[in-house]
């Protein structure tokens, strides 16, 4: 299963999804926020940080991935 890849304990779906997509964990968190209709105010001290944040808006998590991240650990 996609969400079980990466983290041997299976306890961190954010890390599992990040590794499966080849994105950073922070990008997955931003995508999760966007999936819940939350529009965070982003900031960064480096262009690379802002680029990474913008990349998070270019993909969407599946409903199953959002549900896995919403589930209690």
Image: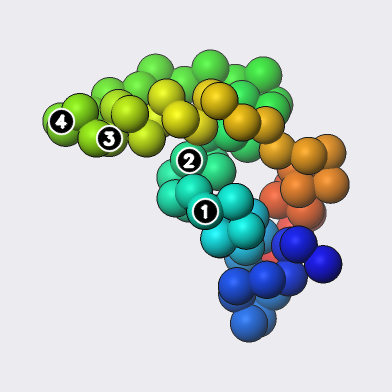
Residue drawn at (63%, 82%) of the image: 8
Mark identifier at residue 45: 4
Mark identifier at residue 49: 3
Q: Secondary structure at mark 3?
A: helix
Q: Secondary structure at mark 4?
A: loop
Contact (CB < 8 A) between labels 3 and 4? yes
Side (left or right) of 28 relative to 66: left
Quarter of the image containing the N terminus?
bottom right
Contact (CB < 8 A) between labels 1 and 2? no
Judging by the rendered image, the residue that carries numbered circle 1 is 22
Q: Quadrant of residue 33?
A: top right
Judging by the rendered image, the residue that carries numbered circle 2 is 27
Q: Residue furthest left?
A: 45
Instruction: Estimate the spatial distance between the alpha carbons at disc 4 and disc 1, rounded to whole Å.
Output: 23 Å
Side (left or right) of 51 relative to 23: left
Q: In terms of sequence position, does the residue under pointer 4 or pointer 1 come before the other? A: 1
The label nearer to you, 1 versus 2, is 1
**Label 1 CA crowd tier, 10 Å (few <14, some 14–19, many 20+):** few
Q: In terms of sequence position, does the residue under pointer 1 or pointer 2 come before the other? A: 1
Q: Secondary structure at mark 2?
A: helix
**Label 3 CA crowd tier, 10 Å (few <14, some 14–19, many 20+):** some
């Amino acid at each position: 299963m996609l969400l079980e890849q990466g983290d041997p304990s299976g306890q961190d779906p954010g890390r599992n999804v990040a590794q499966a997509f080849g994105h950073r964990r922070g990008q997955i968190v931003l995508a999760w926020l966007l999936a819940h209709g939350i529009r965070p105010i982003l900031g960064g001290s480096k262009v690379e940080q802002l680029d990474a944040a913008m990349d998070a808006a270019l993909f969407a998590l599946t409903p199953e991935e959002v549900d896995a991240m919403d589930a209690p650990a």
